[in-house]
Image: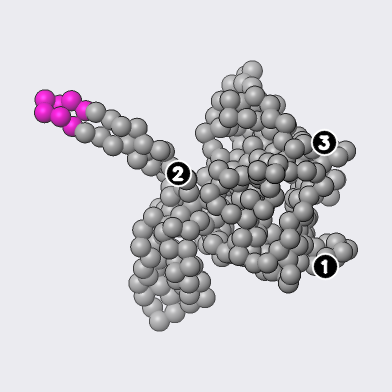
């Protein structure tokens, strides 16, 4: 089951964001609500298992929640996070938590590779996560799929190391955008849906067969093919296309049951083509959506 969302209640609804640590005056917590993501919120401390960094978001009224995310962060893949949602401001009515039954928190990047197919001695053999040199090929997003609930407060808990642009250790967390809201689940169709990479290179062929290439910014892409969807999903997708257009971000998760697929292939995208649907019966329509990665 894939997942598509365009409503971000952190950015679009009245809420208060607080933390148990200080954040840079030039990069405050309110930066979590706005784009571009380069204007990130930056904490002045890292979290530990005993004293993690916490970010609390409280709304004026309950929201519909099926997804929570932190986008374009600088947490290393072996760091940890937790996401909790409560139905009351006093945080006594716990509606959802990512904490496992044995008390373990989630890694930023879960195991991605079957150890049976890894070469002996590989640097990521023990955990099966991304090879360290490949980790930075993808933006570090944290994704949490949530069974539908109506919280009024959520909390992100972070601990572990972080990186700078030169891959040295950072002294605080950088977070480009926080997301919490509702969306729609979509069934994959074999042979129609899939992922890709757009190079966006500009090629010029000169007489005699010479080729000049101006490198472009590589973007991930996704093709969502839905030969037959019912009226509720049809209407939801149509409304979403009007709200988001081609200039507002949407969240795409290719498989809500496999966090590792969401890290590699999911994230913040935008619609790349016009939206249209064609009737295949009085109750169903066919629809194709093309997405490309959001980069600013």
Q: In what element is the residue under mark 3?
A: loop
Disc 2: CA contacts within 10 A as few (<14), some (14-19) or many (>=20): many
The residue that mark 1 highlights is 88
The residue that mark 2 highlights is 220
Viewer can see residue 135: yes
Residue 106 position, x and y percent, is: 74, 43
Report how far apart the C-alphas of labels 2 and 3 lie in the structure: 33 Å
The residue at the point 11 percent across, 25 percent down is 208
Residue 65 position, x and y percent, is: 67, 64
User: Badges 1 and 3: C-beta atoms under 8 Å apart?
Assistant: no
The residue that mark 3 highlights is 48
Report how far apart the C-alphas of labels 1 and 3 lie in the structure: 27 Å
Q: Residue furthest bottom?
A: 282
Report how far apart the C-alphas of labels 2 and 1 lie in the structure: 39 Å
Viewer can see residue 2: no
Disc 1: CA contacts within 10 A as few (<14), some (14-19) or many (>=20): some
133 vs 62, left or right, is left
| Residue 221 vs residue 44, the one in the foreground | 44
Residue 263 position, x and y percent, is: 59, 43
234 vs 166, left or right, is left
The residue at the point 78 percent across, 43 percent down is 22
Q: Answer with mark 2 or mark 1, whichever residue precedes in sequence.
A: 1
Q: Quadrant of the N terminus?
A: bottom right
Q: Which residues are magenta?
A: 205-211
Q: Answer with mark 2 or mark 3, whichever residue precedes in sequence.
A: 3
The residue at the point 77 percent across, 36 percent down is 45
């Amino acid at each position: 089951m894939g997942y598509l969302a365009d409503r971000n209640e952190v950015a679009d609804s009245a809420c208060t964001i607080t933390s148990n640590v200080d954040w840079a005056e030039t990069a405050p917590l309110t930066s979590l609500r706005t784009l571009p993501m380069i204007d990130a919120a930056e904490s002045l401390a890292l979290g530990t298992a005993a004293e993690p960094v916490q970010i609390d978001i409280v709304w004026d009224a309950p929201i519909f929640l099926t997804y929570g995310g932190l986008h374009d962060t600088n947490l290393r893949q072996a760091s940890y996070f937790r996401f909790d949602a409560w139905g009351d401001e006093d945080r006594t009515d716990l509606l959802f938590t990512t904490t496992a039954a044995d008390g373990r928190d989630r890694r930023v990047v879960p195991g991605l590779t079957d150890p049976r197919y890894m070469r002996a001695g590989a640097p990521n053999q023990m955990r099966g996560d991304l090879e360290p040199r490949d980790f930075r090929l993808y933006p570090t997003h944290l994704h949490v799929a949530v069974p539908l609930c109506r919280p009024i407060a959520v909390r992100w808990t972070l601990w572990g190391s972080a990186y700078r642009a030169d891959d040295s250790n950072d002294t605080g967390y950088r977070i480009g955008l926080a997301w919490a809201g509702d969306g729609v689940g979509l069934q994959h169709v074999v042979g129609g849906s899939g992922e890709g990479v757009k190079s966006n290179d500009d090629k010029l062929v000169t007489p005699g067969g010479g080729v000049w290439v101006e490198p472009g910014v590589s973007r991930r892409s996704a093709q969502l093919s839905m030969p037959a969807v019912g009226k509720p999903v049809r209407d939801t997708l149509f409304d979403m296309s009007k709200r988001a257009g081609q200039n507002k971000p949407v969240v795409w998760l290719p498989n809500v049951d496999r966090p590792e697929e969401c890290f590699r292939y999911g994230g913040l995208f935008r619609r790349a083509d016009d939206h249209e649907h064609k009737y295949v019966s009085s109750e169903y329509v066919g629809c194709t959506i093309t997405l490309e990665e959001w980069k600013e």
